[in-house]
Each structure stands twice: as C-alpha cells, then as structure tokens.
Amino acid sequence: MSLNFRRHYPILIVLVILIFVFTFALGNMRVIAYTTQAEPTSETKYMTDYTNDIALFDETVVHSIQVIMSEEDYNSMITTYQETGLKEYFKADIIIDGVRINEVGIRLKGNASLRTALGGNRGFGGNNPADGEQRPARPEGFDPADRPQPPEGFNPGEMPQMQEPPQIPEAGQGPGMNEGMRQQLSDGETKIPFMIKFDEYEDQTYQGYTTVSIRTYGTTYDEANLQEPVTNEAARLAGIPATETAYAGFKINDEEETLYVISELVNEEYLAKYFENADGILYKAELGSTLSYQGEDPSSYADSFTQQTRVNDADLAPLIDFMRFIDQADAATFERELPNYLDADSFATYLAVNTLLVNTDSMIGMNNNYYLYYDDEAERFTLLMWDANESLGKLGGNTTYDVSLTNSQQESRGRGGGMGMGGGQNALITRFMESEIFQALYEEKLQDVYEKVYVSGAMTDTIEQYSALIHSVNDDRALADITAYDQAVEKLKTFIVQRMEYLETLALFEK
C-alpha cells in the first residue's frame, strides 16, 4: 500500500459509509427541489404592462388606435380568411392614445359581421374559431349530423341580406396601400372588425389587458355603432356583468381614422373582475347552442360549445351534467334544484334585458352570443352576455317584440322572423318559463329593468352623451359622416320611444 493511499484511507472509509447511509436509509424518501423565485400568477406572469393616463375604456373620450403593419401581411390576413375561413394572427405595432406597443398580434374577428364585410369561405355557425382563442379541432368520431338542426320549414332567405364584400387587391397589384386600405376600412357601408392581442408574441399587456376587440355595427350598416354600448350600459344598470366599451378612431398605417367601438373580451381578466373565484371553467356558446342534452359523449357538443379556460385540466363534464339536469329533472325537482346549478336571479335579469331591448342575436333568439361560467367552488353556472351589436331590433326584431318568452314564441323564432338559424327552442328557457316560480321571477325582472332603462330615460341619456362626444371631435378628426351619424342616432331614439309606447300597453307595465 502506497504512502498516498494510506494517507487518504480514512477519507475513503468515510465516503463509503456515507454512500451506504444515503442508499439504504434514505433511498425511499422523496427529494423535493426548492426555489426562491415565485411562481407566475395572473398578476405577475407578464414582464411588461404598458400604462397610460387615459384608461382604455374611458367612455368620455374618443380613443385613438393606429396599427402599423406591412401591406403584404395585411393582404395575406384578408385573403387567408376569404380562401380558408381562418383568422390568423399577424405581427404589428400599435399606438393607443399615444402609447406605442411593439410586436402585438392582429387578426380578423367575428362571424356574421366579418362575412358581411369580406365574404369568404365560411358561413354561420360551424367549427369556427372563438373570439380570443383558436377553436380546437372536432373530437375523433364527431358527426355534424348530431348537432341541433334548423327546424322544418326554415327558409335561409329570411335572414338579413348581407352586403356585397369589397374587392381586396392582391399584394403588389391594384390600388396602392393607402387607397386600398381606405376602401376596405371605410368604404361607405363597410368596416372590418379586428382583434388585437398584446401578448401574442411578447410577454406584455396594456393596462392589464391581454386583448381588445375592435368592433363594428354587425351585419347591417349603422354609422353610429351605438347598439352595443347602449345595451351593455343597460345591463350594468340592471345589475349583471357586461363588457366595457368605448368609441375609438381606428386606422391602419397612415390612413384616415374611422369610428369604431372597442370592447373588452370575456376571458380570464374579465372573470377576475366579477367573480371571487375566477379560476373556474368558461364555455362559449356557438350559434344554435340550445343547451339540449345530446348524451354523455363530449363530441356531441363539439359544434355547440367551446371551452375557453382550463382546457388542459377540465372538460365539458359540468356542462353536460347541467344539460342532463335540464332535460331529465321533473318539474318539482327543476324548481327546487335549478338554483344549485345556475344563478337563476342573474339569468332572469339577462332574459329581461335582452327581451326588452330586442336583442335577438342572443340566447332568446339565435341561441348565440352567450357564455356559461362554471364556478367550481360554488359548483354553479352564471350566464354572461356578449356581443350586443345587433341589439335594439337590428336583427329581425321590432318594437312590438313579445316579452312572454313562451314556447310558441320560441318556435316562431325558430321558423321565421330572421331567427331561423338559431336551432329552435332553447331547452333552458323552455323549462324556466314552464315554472310558475321562475316565470314570476322573470316578470319581476322585466318590471325592474323597464323602470331602470326605459322609464328613467337612461338609454336616451347614454345615446345623447355619445352623440355629443362625436360632435365635439368630429370637425377635427372626421371620424364619421356626421349626417349619417345623426340619422342613425335619431333612428335608434325613435326605436326606443316606440318600444316604450308598446310596453306601456302591457298590463305588466301599467302604472
């Protein structure tokens, strides 16, 4: 044995003993790695939040939004949608009320309103991407025939006729960028809706928002674009959540700005504003989502609902359970247990708001444009409004629209009057209105909403405030054809007056 080995022999013995101890004494123990860096949360996961002295949805100003992007990307965004129906994000910079955010995502948004503006290879409903998210592919084995079908006798010609889409120049051909984009964005009665996603390419937000929707008048031209702001304000007065909106002058590159409405989205940020537990499951209803129970197979609902949150650790099970309850519970069980499944008070208010304001592009008509949020702590759903730009009679309604929500009326909406593509009767509304208890609750909400939004003059006040705002800036900014704007305002005010005159004839609203 060498001298060096004898010198280090005691150390070797100690190492052997330590290896023995760790192997046999601690071998079955779990080793946990710790770190001093905090896990990202919804409040801290973004590295940069751009701020501004002007709140994004300040309704007292007309905001300024400029998108800066290449002509090639713009034309590709349009032609991709027209040829494939896909709404893909493209990289751009954006300036909002003087604050510049680089490398955001911009894409086309909407369904009927987008097809009205651009045409393209898509129709109503179907497996379309949801606003704010890309819709997942249909599950294996999905059969489109399983989805609710339009009722017998439906005539597609009863739907409002869409305008001819503008012709989009090929990249590098036709009018130059300035002239071509002006044609697409503000050619008389055509505007294109967009989605801006601040965090599509970078970890960034704007005033805490990840997205903002650049919204238009919907399927028929309206220079004032007031249906959605007025309806959402009415909903808030009635005590239910509604997305914040505001006027904005919008332009791409150096074009003249044009009047749009900006809106927040129903997403995780929105849930955090209104729910103590914002980590539940959000489902978006697609066109024709009647809440009809189709069995336990989730693929049966692939064309009706899109799961928006917790897509990797939750599924449609709570929603299917709710639809099974609607379908199978007897009358007494339904009355007793519905409040365990659904915020019935909020739902009755939702029905009252949409019925009184004749928003047929919602659950009450097209079975469309609503969300269901499942609070997995309370184990209960809340129905949320969305996309009210066809409200106040724009989509097939009129000033004498019935408020009863009876089965016969739902059937008539399914068969004509411009609502045929909604898939017929809504299962939840049908069961709700069959109950004397819930019908009484609904009538109570009708009276309450009627007082708050009609008798108070709140809707007319809101319209006049927006009108005064446009008149105060339009000489300098030329956002709107002021004659067409004033005509749209008067038309809307006339609708409200005539609607109130009709409602006053009903015994429910007698003073």
Image (cartoon, rainbow, N blue to C red):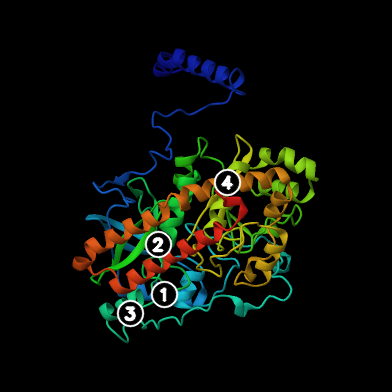
Quick one: SS at disc 1? helix
| Neighbours of disc 3 within 10 Å: few (<14), some (14-19), many (20+) | some
Residue located at (61% from left, 35% from top): 378
Among numbered discs 3 and 4, the one appearing first in the sequence: 3
| Residue that label 4 marks | 445
Q: CA distance from mark 1 to mark 3?
A: 13 Å
Q: CA distance from mark 2 to mark 1?
A: 26 Å
Q: CA distance from mark 2 to mark 3?
A: 23 Å
The answer to whether 82 appears left or right of 367 in the picture is: left
Q: Nearer the viewer, residue 398 or 83?
A: 398
Disc 2 marks which amino acid? Leu
| Neighbours of disc 2 within 10 Å: few (<14), some (14-19), many (20+) | many
Residue 122 position by quadrant: bottom right
Disc 2 or disc 1, which is closer to the eye? 2
Residue 78, numbered label: 1
Disc 3 or disc 4, which is closer to the eye? 4
Disc 1 or disc 3, which is closer to the eye? 3
Disc 4 marks which amino acid? Lys
Among numbered discs 1 and 3, the one appearing first in the sequence: 1
Quick one: SS at disc 3? helix
| Residue that label 3 marks | 183
> Can residue 262 be seen in this snapshot?
yes
Among numbered discs 4 and 1, the one appearing first in the sequence: 1
Disc 1 marks which amino acid? Ile
| Residue that label 2 marks | 226
